[in-house]
Image (cartoon, rainbow, N blue to C red):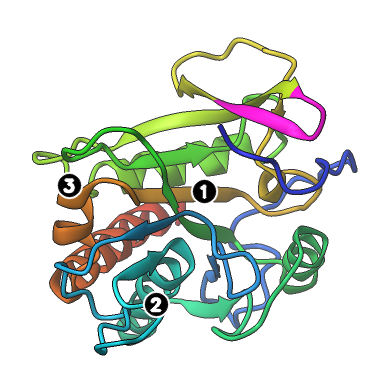
Amino acid sequence: MKTKYGKVLLTAVLAAVLGGCSSGGGKPVILLDAGHDLQEAGYTAYDPDLELPFVNYEEGAEDAGLITEAAYDEALTAELESLLKATGQFTVVRMKDADDTMTMAQRLEKIDKENPDLVVSIHAIHTTEQGATAPLICVEPPASNTHDASFAAGSALQAHLYPAERESRLVYCYYTPVRPETWQLHIVPADDATDYGEETLEIMTGNSAPVVQIAMLSMHSHEDLEALASAEGIRQTAEMIRDGLTDYFADQK
């Protein structure tokens, strides 16, 4: 169960014309969003036995062994930013600096301001499973004006994100109200175009750009953390995302 941040903005969305209205000097503009920050750390886990690159393990430290979604999101986003820039094919913009905090309303304003060709938001999930979990690639629901671009980008990413070992899932992410200010995440396979009449992820509403949200690991899966949140796991994941995005934009030409 997850408490939903704020209310979904119900402003109308404008269709984005890929390659035709970005501000990247002829290059596709990718806006990268590390989904959480120091003020809203997201999911947390505790494991002093995992030597991850972004966790404080100093003896006596209060946060020794504490692993936050925010730290993982930032580590993966930073690595992806570096790899995308190295290709020379994209203009890469960060939603915010690593130490900044940003509300959802500010994120939507940033998207409208930057007018990117694609927004990629990095997250983690929480499950009760202790083994390896399948990454989730959330795309915009069928009713969205930018659904087709979001779906195409998500499909390209799915083809690259651990296709053999973890078989990432392409999905729609809706929220079902449970009680006041609390929602249950409702995940639907992306081949299900049913109008459920439910709200979706806020970053996918009220802006003019297609969005994909990638949730690579479960914060409560030791196997996920060991494999995917290690320095090598972060590098490999970023390379797969880069390759998926490269394929997606090659198809748009």
Marks 2 and 3 sit apart, C-alpha to C-alpha, by 31 Å
Q: Is residue 166 left or right of residue 192?
A: left
Q: Secondary structure at mark 2?
A: loop
Identity of the residue drawn at 39% across and 52% down: 248
Amino acid carrying label 2: it is Asp
What residue sits right under mark 1 in the picture? 212
Identity of the residue drawn at 52% across and 48% down: 212
The quadrant the N terminus occupies is top right
Q: Position of residue 124 (x, y in %)?
A: 42, 52
- Residue 250 in the image: above or below residue 27: above
Q: Secondary structure at mark 3?
A: loop
Q: Is residue 192 left or right of residue 251?
A: right
- Lower position in the chain sequence, tag 2 or tag 3: 2
Identity of the residue drawn at 68% across and 54% down: 209
Frontmost of labels 2 and 3 is 2
Residue 241 is marked as none
- Residue 164 in the image: above or below residue 21: above
Q: Position of residue 41 (x, y in %)?
A: 55, 65
Q: Is residue 244 left or right of residue 103?
A: left
- Residue 82 in the image: above or below residue 182: below
Q: Position of residue 31 (x, y in %)?
A: 57, 69
Q: Is residue 27 magenta?
A: no
Answer whether labels 2 and 3 touch (C-beta < 8 Å). Answer: no
What residue sits right under mark 2 in the picture? 63
Magenta stretch: give its range. Answer: 179-185
Identity of the residue drawn at 52% across and 58% down: 121
Frontmost of labels 1 and 2 is 2
Amino acid carrying label 3: it is Tyr
**Seen from this angle, which residue lies furthest left?**
164
Q: Is residue 184 magenta?
A: yes
Q: Is residue 171 left or right of residue 217?
A: right
Residue 162 is marked as 3
